[in-house]
Image (cartoon, rainbow, N blue to C red):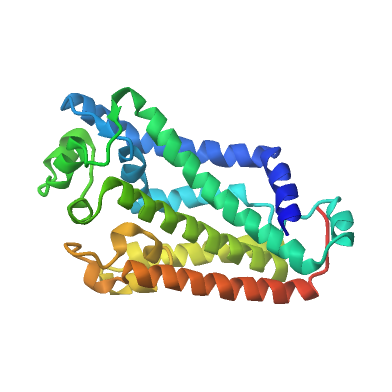
Amino acid sequence: MFEICKYQLRQGFFSIRTYIALLIGIVIEIVCIMPLGEFSKIINAPLNIYDAFLYFNLNSVNAVVVFLALVVLISDIPFTSHNENYVLLRTTKKKWVMGKILYLFIMCTFFYIVLFFVGTLFTADNFSCSNEWSKPLTTLSQDTNGTLQTEYNVYFPYKYLITKYSPFETTVLSITLSIFYGFVMSLFIFLMNLLFPRVLGYAYSMILHLINYTLIFVFTSHKFIKYSLLGNNLLAYHKIDGNVIGKFALTLKQSYVLDFVIILILVFLIMKSMRKYEFKTT
């Protein structure tokens, strides 16, 4: 299993697809955090080392769009190549699948860690290394009438997170939820591509992503949030003290348990589907 994963990592890091996906994600992030960097300089207050990533990743629209970059990263699922025939001669289908699944988790984690460090480096000329909330974000969290949003195009309505968690805790929660959503959706794409032609596999996956988005943003009532996998993996959409929509959402513990259960189900279905899969190279 680990050798399969190691082999796939070598293939992935030599693929132009990986760097295109990272470039897309990085561009989206930089465009998002530029107003925050300007705002911190205007009020002459440094950002925290975690601020750029949190400002970017807590924004639900950014999370929806950046997932498309992640899809590019893993777009060759199930990663079949001419060499795979020889690989399968030396291992079992079970180990082959588990190696690919481990690769997916590593790449999802790598993707979001890269985004974290890019955000940090982009604001490196004006940040401090501490685990205290910075003045720019605390100021924005108190902008209840939207004056700063209108004037400086910056928005951070998460006072309840500032009250409840430290910047480090918020970053860990936000990044792990994002990784789990990316991993679950990657497994779903893997399964769809085993069951259907690749075009249909991606079509069904994008439909699921769109449904998750619709349950959050299209319906005026927030009572559908807990039925959205995307919503359950966005930190801002959880039952946290002070969160207005929290009464409609799951707790963080419930979201992590749900992700774990869905992952187990998808892995089981992938293993079952692989037995009937006609191996083809691309």
Tell me: 242 left or right of 120. left
Against 223, residue 79 (above or below) is above
Return the x and y of residue 61 as percentages of the image width and height. 37, 51
State the count of labels.
0
Return the x and y of residue 243 as percentages of the image width and height. 20, 62
Against 103, residue 278 (above or below) is below
Tell me: 151 left or right of 167. left
Return the x and y of residue 123 as percentages of the image width and height. 34, 29
Q: Which residue lies furthest to the top in this view?
A: 125
Return the x and y of residue 120 as percentages of the image width and height. 38, 33
Q: Residue at x 65, y 68 (%)?
A: 191
The part of the image, by quadrant, that contains residue 187 is: bottom right
The part of the image, by quadrant, that contains residue 161 is: bottom left
In this view, the residue in front, 180 or 195, is 180
In this view, the residue in front, 224 or 4, is 4
Against 55, residue 256 (above or below) is below
Residue 89 seen anywhere in this rendered image of the structure: yes
Q: Which residue is drawn at 70% across and 59% down?
A: 99
The part of the image, by quadrant, that contains residue 272 is: bottom right
Q: Residue at x 36, y 59 (%)?
A: 234
Q: Residue at x 23, y 68 (%)?
A: 246
> Which of the image's four quarters has the N terminus?
bottom right
Against 276, residue 119 (above or below) is above
Residue 228 seen anywhere in this rendered image of the structure: no
Tell me: 207 left or right of 123. right
Tell me: 62 left or right of 41. right
